[in-house]
Image: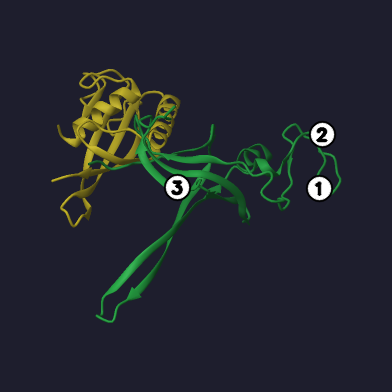
Amino acid sequence: MSVSSSFASYLAGVTGTTLGQDLFIGEAPSSNRVADTVWWIVENGGGIVQKNATGETRKSYQFNVYCRDRDYGAILTAMSALEEDLNCDACTQLSGYDTIDIEATTFPIDNDLDAEDRKKGLLQVTITTYKEC
Amino acid sequence: MALVRGPFDLKWGDNTLLNIEEVSVDYEQDSEDYTTVQHNTYELDGPIKASITITLLATDIAALSVVLPQYHVNNGGVMSTGETVSNANGAIDVVAQDCDAGDVYNDLDVISCGNPGDVFRLVNARTKLDSVEFDDKIRKIMVKFIGVPAQGDGVVQFFKEGTINVVS
């Protein structure tokens, strides 16, 4: 399982969404094919931040988590709740990854690119994992 | 083998300590070097001393009465300087103890997250006020837990939560 899939599974549990229905990886489907409220995550990549003398590595991955809705207030509430969940839930282990830390930063809500009266919220998530090679 | 991760829970006896910014462990073992005329050096180890200093961010009377019970004056009690306390949480009156009379001893457990967690225990620790720090935003209080194990007992211990039992 890729770290994106593992994070998406975790996110589905936290946000109460379903992968493939209102939560997507990589990009959101066009607005006429899904409900108004959708979430999607985009992986920004990651790399090694520390390598042990015995070969194990500490890696840092970055994700953008987007939420699209017609209701500005609903996005604000959802993103704020998610930010608090992610920053407080420090004991969580992503499936298949020895997770050291999950941190989230919020960004301003903006108009969605395709407009249609929709807004888009952004949360940037940094996940630090530990890997035995 | 696995990482032992935070956030960590701190328990002193039955009390869970919260709002801790930092935990600092001091561990020291006396030792002395002896050199032979054959040019060998031997290091001989002696007694061990260990303590843990925590930095508390929540420093109201309710929080301090948990970690410094020996200095706690109940509501209606009298301070060492003669005033009567009229607050539900009482007050803290730091007075030098006579012959350790008021000291409270408990194991201090630092427990990792996970179920079960990994425990680092400072055996039979008493507390004392270490220092107080003010900036323009918040008051911080450093409390030192000093391990005072009984003769022959360990100073610090590592174990899995819930896996050691008292022998009856």
Front position in the image: A102 or B100: B100
Gap between marks 3 and 1, in whole Å? 37 Å
| Residue type, mark 1 in image | Ser
Which one is earlier in the sequence, the residue at label 3 or at label 1?
1
The image quadrant of residue A83 is top left
**Closer to the camera: disc 2 or disc 3?**
3
Q: Does residue A85 sit above or below A36 in this rendering?
A: below
Mark number for residue B152?
3
Q: Secondary structure at mark 2?
A: loop
What's the colour of chain A in the image?
Answer: yellow
The structure residue drawn at horizontal position 34% and vertical position 32%, both measured from the top left corner, is B114
Query: Are labels 2 and 3 assigned to the same chain?
Result: yes
Q: Residues within 10 Å of mark 3 (few under 14, many from 20)?
A: few
User: Residue B14 location, x and y as percent?
Assistant: 54, 31
Q: How is the image coloured?
A: by chain
User: On the image, numbered disc 1 is attached to which residue?
Assistant: B80
The structure residue drawn at horizontal position 66% and vertical position 49%, both measured from the top left corner, is B100
What's the colour of chain B in the image?
Answer: green
| Residue type, mark 3 in image | Gly
Left or right, B167 with reference to A65? right
Q: Secondary structure at mark 3?
A: loop
User: Residue B29 location, x and y as percent?
Assistant: 42, 60
Q: In the rendered structure, the residue with mark 1 lies on which chain?
A: B
Mark number for residue B76?
2
Front position in the image: A5 or B146: B146
